[in-house]
Image: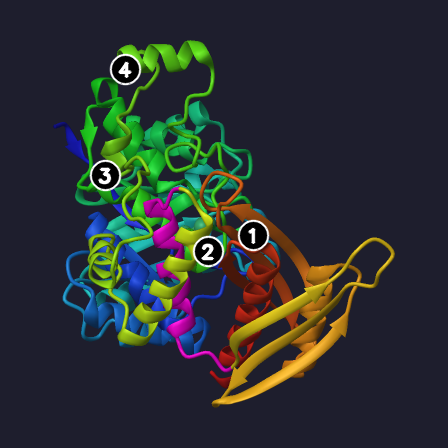
Amino acid sequence: MGKNIIIFDTTLRDGEQSPGISLNIQDKLEIAMQLARLGVDVIEAGFPITSEGDFKAVKTIAEEVEGPVICGLSRAVRKDIERAGDALRNCKKPRIHTFINSSDVQIKHQLKKTRKEVLQMTEEAVKLAKSICNDIEFSAMDATRADINFIYELVGVAIENGATTINIPDTVGYSMPWEFGEFIASIIKNVKRSREVVWSVHCHNDLGLSVANSICAVKNGVTQVECTINGIGERAGNAAMEELVMIMDTRKDILNVSTKIKTAEIMKTSQLISRLTGYQVQPNKAIVGMNAFAHTSGIHQDGVLKERTTFEIMNPQKIGLKESKLILGKTSGRHAFSKHLGELGYFLNEESLERAFVRFKDLADKKVEITENDLEAIAQDEKRISQKETFVFESIETSSGTGKIPQASIKLKKDDKIISAKADGDGQVDAVCNAISRATGIKTKLLVYNVSSITSGLDSQGEVTIHLEIGGKRIIGRGVSTDIIEASAKAYLNAINKSIQLKEK
Ligand code: KIV
Ligand code: ZN
């Protein structure tokens, strides 16, 4: 088994800091529940002082999610710590995480303080946090660019005043793996009472080394790693949890460590994060990319068919990947359809189920094979639609051709009334988006437009992700259909509906 490594998930805090991601409380709760099923030890649910929304999200998760420790972030200042404490008041296993800049460049230019003042602030912050909660994590931000002797002193103060976990972040992803390993070993060796605390690392991926650095830290004595699902996070992101966990599992022969993660939940969690954040996973991403277990070369295929381990170091089933297979056909009824959705974890209300069933039948007419991925795509889309949207998509018609100006007509429903609009555009997608803007009266600026296929084959379902700027905010919308123009209309409308929700909030 080896030493247990604590998995501290910060998808909802550092992950949510990625540009364009804006999760509502319901999304955050759904993610936190899935993280609990995945078996993470700690969920950093948010940064309560930053907004009313973050405060409520941390509070809701603290009250409703059982199992993991729930953590709220705070700067080393009174109002942040008290706000985090308030959000965690009804939590069974609360943790306050307080941090302060530790490198001279940040202390001087960002904090505009001296090292002495930083030591003083740390003492006061940890003392205050300890008076509210027993489980206290302290982070020395930008530790890898700080003077190591100052780090000894700083974390020593945090320990003396009651911190129970000390986190050493590579905030700007600057360290080399061997350098980081030595840095960690020296800190653990030279800090007084270091055996009394849990040592943790938090690595960013600016040079693509976040996972390698975290693993080197584990090799050198840390027992907590901070990470996010799919590696999302500030700039180039954070260390990817699925990679860390599967490295520790696959190479336990030399690492001699283990985690409590239920690896069979990894794929599902990755897909949930991708769906709710709009951040798609690159096809060749380790562990959770769609090609991570796909073999193309004849030699590899031949080997795997003879014996899987010839070209596979992990069993795909271990991360919850199942081969897509034909599970339903044209002749299946409503009952079988809803049972299959239930087995996939989708329990739709009657109205959504009815709509999903019509879509499934329609798809079965067009497509030779209906796979589980197809079903999931329909169910996810219906789930999204059923989350009270101001404008509901009804239908579109488009026309275009060589030498003709592309045109689109859209029908939307708002409060049971049909709204129609027509518009031209540079292409069919542009015309559809213009028609929707006209119908809703909402002006947007298109930042990113991305189409991908959810399932394989020419008859597959397409997924469109759109990033729009609406009222100065970046909003992501998604839509699914076998028709790319329709998927684009749904994605565009999804972003507009989100912007309305955001405004109402
Ligand atoms: O990257 C960082 O240093 C952080 C701290 C708040 C832990 O996110
Ligand atoms: Zn970070």
**Is residue 310 or residue 64 the one in the foreground?**
310
Secondary structure category for the residue under label 3: helix
Q: Residue placed at 73% from the left, 67% from the top?
A: 431
Q: Please state the extent of the stretch shown in magenta in the rendering.
A: 369-390
Q: Amino acid at mark 4?
A: Thr
Q: Amino acid at mark 2?
A: Lys
**Structural crowding at the residue carrying mark 2, measured as other residues with C-alpha within 10 Å and reported as few (<14), some (14–19) or many (≥20):** few
First-in-chain label (2 vs 3): 2
Mark 2 → mark 1, Cα distance in angstroms: 14 Å
Please tell me in which quadrant of the rendered image residue 421 appears. Answer: bottom right
Q: Are marks 2 and 4 in contact (CB under 8 Å)?
A: no
Q: Are marks 1 and 4 in contact (CB under 8 Å)?
A: no
**Is residue 371 or residue 273 the one in the foreground?**
371
Q: Where does residue 24 sit, x and y in percent of width and height?
A: 41, 71
**Structural crowding at the residue carrying mark 1, measured as other residues with C-alpha within 10 Å and reported as few (<14), some (14–19) or many (≥20):** some
Q: Residue placed at 40% from the left, 13% from the top?
A: 300
Secondary structure category for the residue under label 2: helix
Q: Is residue 179 magenta?
A: no
Vertical comparison of 318 with 351: above or below: above
Which residue position is annotated with label 1? 106
